[in-house]
Amino acid sequence: MRITERGYTLYYYDGGGIDKIVYFFTENRGVLPAIAKGAKKSKNRFGGNLEPLNEVEIILYEKENREMPIIEKVNIINENFSLFEDFDSFNYLMTIADIIIKFTPHNIKQEKLYRLFSAVLSALKKGVNIEKLFSYFIIWFLRIEGMLPEFSRCYNCGKEFKNFEDFYVSEDGSSLLCSDCKSSKSIYIPSSFKIFYQLTKSMAPVECSSIEFKESEKIRKFLIKLLKIYGEKNLKSFKYLEKLSD
Ligand SMILES: [Zn+2]
């Protein structure tokens, strides 16, 4: 059966032989892996159309009993080649792609996450800082997946979480704890996190330009810690961002 999907190319890897496996993030089916036959040959029919992050129309051939559909054609609708000009942006974006591929179920529509991803890319094209957008993306990703604790009160004693007061997330990532109730394994929340967190609740990614973003490195590292707990694994792409200093 021939089907057409719309979405973004996330990335591809060698599929053995002369083929590539391409991961798309589609509007209707979430993460969709597919085979690009012969794509590793220097002269192939896909040309540059499989490069990551472009918005594309994908024509696929799908057999009922076959695991992965075969790509017939990829047409670029909106090109995003310029997003790769900066090395840091490239790494942040590939980490986001990695998170979507490894931490979400495949072949299932992810409406909210799709809108978030699309809005983050378009904000980046409009010049919004990638570090802010990355942290914005992670906060919303965790929230959409139901994996972010409510940053309001200590889970144990009910003490209110105030700006610039020492607060922690429990070891399993599920709840907020004050300094009296934390354990030695609780994760410290950077003092400026709460302000950024609250702003992201009401602002679109493109509006992030105006936000003051203090302690960006600490916030990024804190969010990666939460991701590792919730995803129950480390990703190779996290390592680069953990080493990166501001
Ligand atoms: Zn407490």
Image: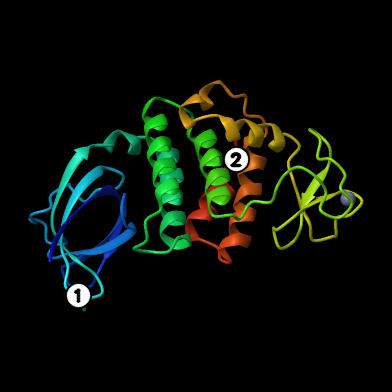
> In the rendered image, which residue does mark 1 sit on?
64
Label 2 secondary element = loop
**Image coords of residue 28 (percent x, y):** 31, 53
Q: Is residue 213 left or right of residue 40?
A: right
Quadrant for the N terminus, please.
bottom left
Q: Number of numbered discs present?
A: 2
Q: Which residue is mark 2?
A: 245
Image quadrant where residue 183 sits: bottom right
What label sits on residue 162 in the rendered view?
none
Q: Is 200 placed left or right of 119 in the picture?
A: right
Q: Where residue 174 sits: x, y (%)?
A: 70, 58
Secondary structure of the residue carrying tag 1 is loop
Q: Is residue 10 visible?
A: no
For the point 51% across and 61% down, the residue is 235
Classed neighbour count for the residue bearing mark 2: other residues with Cα under 10 Å, few (<14), some (14–19), many (≥20):
few
Q: Nearer the viewer, mark 2 or mark 1?
A: 1
Tag 2: residue type?
Answer: Ser
Question: Looking at the image, which residue sits at the far right?
Answer: 180
Q: Nearer the viewer, residue 171 or 92?
A: 171
In screen coordinates, is 104 left or right of 190? Answer: left
Q: Is residue 197 above or below residue 39?
A: above
**Label 1 sits on what residue type?**
Glu
Vertical placement of residue 124 versus 14, above or below: above
Residue 210 vertical placement versus 71 (above, below): above
